[in-house]
Image (spheres, rainbow, N blue to C red):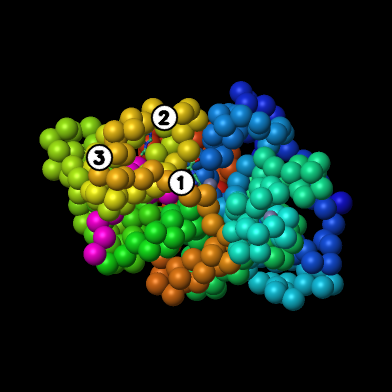
Amino acid sequence: MIATKGYAAQDAHSDLAPFQFERREVNPHDVQFDILYCGVCHSDLHQIRDEWGGSIFPMVPGHEIVGRITAVGTHVTKFKVGDLAGVGCLVDSCRQCANCQEGLEQYCLVGNSQTYNGLEQDGKTPTYGGYSNLIVVHENFALHISKTLDLAGVAPLLCAGITTYSPLKHWKVGKGHKVAVLGLGGLGHMAVKFAVAFGAEVTMLSTSPSKEEDAKRLGAHKFVLTTDPDSVKDVKGYFDFIIDTVSAPHDYNLYLSLLRTNGVHICVGAPPTPAEIMGFSLIGGRKSIAGSGIGGIAETQEMLDYCAEHNILSDVEVISIKDIQTAYDRMLKGDVRYRFVIDMSSL
Ligand code: NAP
Ligand code: ZN
Ligand code: ZN
């Protein structure tokens, strides 16, 4: 076993603290890499606090991981020592079910292995995430990272990036579409960048007036303050798609009223409590409410390659691991511009 150090939550109520644990030895198809940067996703906070239920402790969060390969198994063909590599939200899946065969490992019918707060495919070994100094992973679940991009800005692509890229691709969002991005945080700012890059007209729907300038800088064509009823009135029945990245409970009926006929409200944000949706919010205008989870491995690689080609990165604030609690507090207040990324050399 390989001695590893990280930061862990011991239960749903305590702060993260240093934690020693072990990773498996490098198997023939595994790669081992030193983690250089790890992004801080709102999902980390939901899971540390057990807001979705079923959390496994101790928990080492982190699923926006980039680093450099230090060892490869005897059968590894995709990577060599010294290469850059990334790991997102998945470290394994059954690899055989219909969804895995189609590259939809995020919807593995048997149950995938999430990077942390999950179990390996043996069903008993807990997984530990990227708030740590190294990781060992099957080469099929490691991603290639371009040498040309800033690594701290790449890390959030592994979750915030793919989670917004995947639904935009699935619904073929592009030229001629009017898209709203709801919530300007980690996912929201990537959704703006991708939707703009794909040619859509993009409107930012935000509760924070202070983010208007940033939204425009990120490429949004319009900004609507959702706490101002008059501004909201102007976009009633306007959008083809809403990408909803909000992490807290909110009124879906209000946002459904902003969709045009046949419009789709795509949930990627995962508030911890159920929402009340009126049938009439959907009936009038044949509207849909849908969801989307991260993305498969092949699509994640496609997204990373797209970002390298189009110079798309996350806007990050690099922090030291000792400041993680402050980062969480700020994230809860919506004060993220627009992703915290931990410099792992601070561990
Ligand atoms: P984040 O950086 O904290 O951003 C969330 C944004 O939502 C905030 O910046 C804020 O934007 C807005 N917001 C917060 N509370 C709100 C409220 N009560 N009403 C309206 N807007 C509110 O979070 P994130 O990392 O982007 O993650 C967002 C959500 O996506 C989380 O629930 C996370 O677990 C989930 N997620 C899902 C997937 C998936 O596969 N589907 C993957 C990753 C994350 P404004 O200031 O602009 O209003
Ligand atoms: Zn995430
Ligand atoms: Zn599967």
Distance between mark 3 and mark 1 Cα atoms: 20 Å
Packing grade of label 1 (10 A; few <14, some 14-19, many >=20) is some
Kind of element beneath mark 2: loop
Give the residue type that dot 1 points to.
Gly
Report the front residue among 99 and 78: 99
Task: Indicate the position of residue 217 as horizontal and vertical percent values.
Answer: 26, 57
Q: Is residue 187 magenta?
A: yes
The residue at the point 57 percent across, 32 percent down is 52
The amino acid type found where label 2 is placed reads Ala
Q: Disc 3 versus disc 2: distance between alpha carbons?
A: 19 Å
**Is disc 3 in contact with disc 2, using a CB cutoff of under 8 Å?**
no
Segment colored magenta: 176-188
> Up-down: is 214 above or below 208?
below
Identify the disc placed on residue 275: 2
Q: Cα distance, mark 2 to mark 1?
A: 13 Å
Query: Which residue matches tag 1?
Result: 291
| Earlier-in-chain disc, 2 versus 1 | 2
Reading the image, the residue beneath label 3 is 284
